[in-house]
Amino acid sequence: MNNFIFHNPTKLIFGKDTIANISTEIPAGKKILVTFGGGSVKRNGVYDQVTKALEKFEYVEFWGIEPNPTVETLRKAISIVKSENIDFILAVGGGSVIDGSKLIAAAALIEEDAWDLVRRPSLYKGVLPLASVLTLPATGSEMNRGAVITNQNLKEKFAFYSAYPIFSILDPQVTFSLPQFQIACGLTDTFVHVLEQYLTTTDQSQLMDRWAEGILSTIVEIAPRVCSKDLDYNDMATFMLSATMALNGFIAMGVTQDWATHMIGHELSALHNLTHGHTLAIVLKGTMWVMKEEKGDKILQMGRRIWGIEETDKEQAIRMTIECTDGFFRSLGLKTRLSENNIGADTIDEIVKRFRERDVHFGENRSVDPENTRKILEYVM
Ligand code: NZQ
Ligand code: ZN
């Protein structure tokens, strides 16, 4: 096990009717920017609960942070924060609204442009205090310091690291209005977050392995029910907590991590505006197959423990594990081939070109280079 420091300061407020807690969690006297997406919160009652809880506060609303949040939209919010002397940000939405708000909270403290901050971490000078009301289980943004920002003009998408939310409110009741496709993408994102931290080598930490496998098995178990029409509170609560636990540092203690599938997926979103979880369902099969020499033993462990594969021939068992994983995403209704999503070889060429220019080496062994990226994407064509 590698050395590590674990520190996650986000206060998690979880359960039925917890949105009202906003009123006591935000310090009195703060002037708040409340950020939203495209309007789902007006249809499912979240907006009414948030505004009721904010009755005693002075606040400004900012609407329109889109899925795959763009710096072009966020710049407008940053200028409002500066001109209105806002000193607290409350993000109400999915990962995109929370991520976008993390950039707003950081860019408001510097003179330079927000995109420069995304590309040059040295410009970072801290953040305004930020909290969230999560409406979509998927990204873990409610309890981590990551944010992924798109530049629509450049067709680029990059991760950026700012601060953890001070508190995040997770009321599973708000997930009942999620469209089936977003549930499928959220389950997939959660599943692949775990794999990015698990699917490396065996025998680094039995405890991390079992925690990771606990989340994977839980997602597999609840997926058919969470994807059905009859949603159950406990299932949605389990889904929501699984997504948070998958990317808040808990399963990353002392182990190596991969993230190549995410990095390639971000390019598919940047070029085609695909939903994040969907990109992972496409790319992962290729990563598992192309990197199977390095990841083979862990793929076998996953096959045995998650999919119950008892095949003793190593190559065959690896194939079966990859097929079960891909089959799981397809069972959620996701199309897992590039061609099924009208994405052609020109996109592969463009991603490989970008990765050459950036001289990238992703993965736990830094071996997912532009050439392996081509193999991964061609495998899932
Ligand atoms: O915009 P509204 O109208 O609110 O609708 C949203 C949006 O259209 C809708 N939605 C959210 N909650 C709902 C709901 N509809 C009905 N009922 C609800 N309760 O869902 C759509 C998608 O929302 P979005 O926030 O984009 O989804 P998600 O939470 O999956 O976030 C995706 C973004 O997060 C980034 C992704 O790259 C992507 O940009 N990620 C952030 C990470 C992080 N911060 O650590 C890690 C992840 O790997 C990921 O990269
Ligand atoms: Zn993700």
Image (cartoon, rainbow, N blue to C red):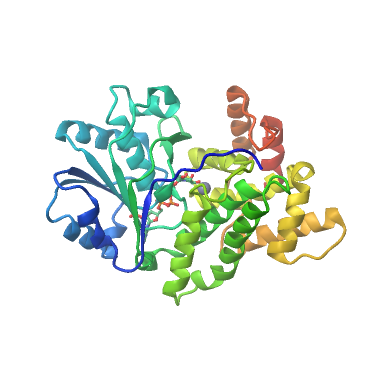
Kindly identify the residue that appears in the image at 68 percent across and 63 percent down: 306
Kindly identify the residue that appears in the image at 72 percent across and 39 percent down: 375
Residue 261's quadrant in the figure?
top right
Answer left or right for 177 relative to 5.
left
Quadrant of the drawing holding the N terminus: top right
Number of marks present in the image shown: 0
Q: Residue furthest right?
A: 313
| Percent position of residue 162, x then y | 39, 35
Residue 344's quadrant in the figure?
top right
Kindly identify the residue that appears in the image at 38 percent across and 48 percent down: 10
Observer-nearest residue: 118 or 213?
213
Is 96 rendered above or below residue 152? below
Answer left or right for 95 relative to 40.
right
Q: Mark yes or no: residue 341 visible.
A: no
Observer-nearest residue: 60 or 32?
32
Answer left or right for 282 relative to 178.
right
Q: Residue furthest bottom?
A: 230
| Percent position of residue 123, x then y | 38, 23
| Percent position of residue 97, x then y | 35, 47
| Percent position of residue 272, x then y | 50, 42
Q: Mark yes or no: residue 86 visible.
A: yes
